[in-house]
Image (cartoon, helix red, strand yellow):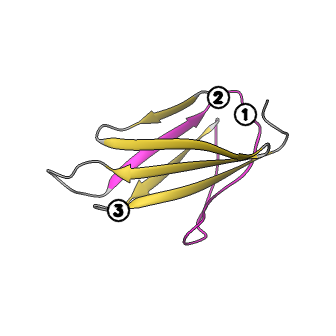
Amino acid sequence: LHLSIRRQRQMCIRDRVSPTHLRLTLVDGGYLAPMDRKVKVTLNNLAVKKVSDILDGTSYSVKDSSFDVTVPCGMFRFIDIELQKPFM
């Protein structure tokens, strides 16, 4: 699985929860200069059905295989990525 994250000072952890669900954890890594972080997530070669934040229910639109997420200052986001077909 190739996942591209564009943002400095951003920590990302990716885990496969099931054959059709990925969990993406994004953490604001700017502990010396905390601020809201805008993150662009690019999903290469994946047919995505739905992307949402599991804590607050926010849905994200995927356009051209990518979507933007804002990680609040000093916080984190847990993003659920549901695929149209199982990932091998």
For this rendering, which residue is in front, 79 or 67? 79
Q: Position of residue 72 (x, y in %)?
A: 35, 62
Q: Which residue is drawn at 57% across and 55% down?
A: 79
Q: Is mark 2 on a helix, strand or loop?
A: loop
Query: What range is drawn magenta here?
Result: 37-64
Tag 1 residue: 46
- Quadrant holding the N terminus: top right
Q: Residue at x 20, y 52 (%)?
A: 31
Mark 3 neighbour class, 10 Å CA radius: few under 14, some 14 to 19, many 20 or more: some
The amino acid pointed to by label 2 is Leu
Earlier along the polypeptide chain: callout 2 or callout 3? 2
Earlier along the polypeptide chain: callout 2 or callout 1? 2
Tag 2 residue: 1
Cα gap from disc 1 to disc 3, whole angstroms: 27 Å
Cα gap from disc 2 to disc 1, whole angstroms: 8 Å
Asked if residue 13 lies left or right of residue 52, the reply is left
Q: What element carries label 1?
A: loop
Residue 49 magenta-highlighted: yes
> From what the image shows, is residue 40 above or below residue 37?
above
The amino acid pointed to by label 1 is Leu
The amino acid pointed to by label 3 is Met
Q: Which mark is residue 75?
A: 3
> From what the image shows, is residue 50 above or below residue 41?
below
Q: Are marks 2 and 1 in contact (CB under 8 Å)?
A: yes
Q: Residue 72 carries which label?
A: none
List the single residue furthest toward the bottom. Answer: 56
Earlier along the polypeptide chain: callout 1 or callout 3? 1
